[in-house]
Amino acid sequence: MADASVDRRDKPGDDRLADPCPTLLRAFATLFLLLTLLLSFPALAHESRPLTVVINQQTATHFLLTWRAPSSIDPRNAPALALGAPCTEQSRAMEGFTGRALYECAGGLEGARLSIDYPAYNPSVSSLVRVLWKSGEVSTQLLPPETTRWRAPAPETFSGVARSYFELGVKHIVIGVDHILFLIGLLILARTPRRVLVTVTGFTIAHSITLALVALNLVRVSVPAIEAAIALSIVFVAAEIARGNKNTLAWRRPILVASTFGLLHGAGFAAVLGE
């Protein structure tokens, strides 16, 4: 009887029942892959494009305010933007999702309050605000959906601009569904805390680098091609997890995958803003 008991425990089927972790991981990976494929289709994906706002310094005291709302917003709820004191409005024109207004700011732009007003309701989209100074310096701020008031800063140094774009990249990663899915996949591939830290850091730095390069017009990319590549990058990571072959490069060196695809994700966001 003892031998028979040993034989039953040694059956392959009993081993699988005793260690369900690989089966559960494979089931989770399959679900993750299906979710990724579903959210990769543009028609079903969450609209992550922000309201883009540019304040362009024309002269020492004149500033041109332009804006464009994403097409996900109801046309009847298109926002109206304005600059407050010390700026006074000289002219205004609005058409559909875009608008422009010229201001004279006798005391300079610093401290002027930008207001973003939606006539019906707040559609919960972020706002990307860029100030283009006559000196060539650029100030950038990504406002969360609940923030509809913002005060203009003084011109930034180069290090300040670099810091702003890095912060912008981090914020975009946090609010983007595609980036969250991709990072979840990277966490599964990385496995250990140290590899997770290195992998996520590599993705964030790469994302911020191309975001800055494309946003500053130092590199030009095709929006449709980049968006397709981003969708494929998510599917690639999900497929690697579902396969479970830990001898592939994605499992052995997730930092390389994270950095390479991080460049794509950053370029995609910046390219959309430049449309």
Image (cartoon, rainbow, N blue to C red):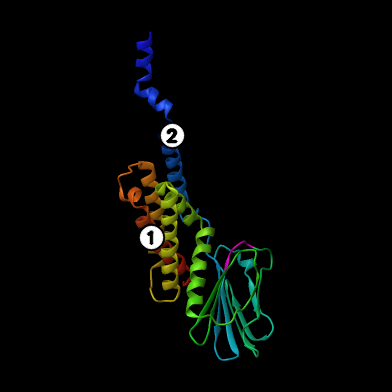
Question: To which residue does mark 2 refer?
Answer: 21
- Identify the main secondary structure in magenta: loop
Q: Quadrant of residue 21?
A: top left
Rendered residue at 42%/56% (across/down): 198
In the image, taking residue 181 as reference, residue 110 lies left or right, namely right
Residue 78 appears in view:
yes
Q: Give residue 6's position: percent from left, percent from top.
A: 36, 15
**Residue 192 numbered tag:** none
Residue under numbered circle 1: 259
Crowding at label 1, few (<14), some or many (≥20) Cα neighbours within 10 Å? many
Residue type at numbered disc 2: Cys
Residue type marked 1: Ser
> Does residue 56 appear left or right of residue 83 in this picture?
left
Tell which of 88 and 121 is nearer to you: 88
> Is residue 124 highlighted in magenta?
yes
Mark 2 vs mark 1, CA separation in Å: 29 Å
Badge 2 marks a residue whose secondary structure is: helix
The local secondary structure at tag 1 comes to helix
Image-quadrant location for residue 27: top left
Q: Earlier in the sequence, mark 2 or mark 1?
A: 2
Measuring from the top left, give residue 175's x and y in whole percent. 54, 59
Residue at screen point 37% across, 51% down: 236
Residue at left 42%, top 68%? 209
State which region is magenta. 123-127
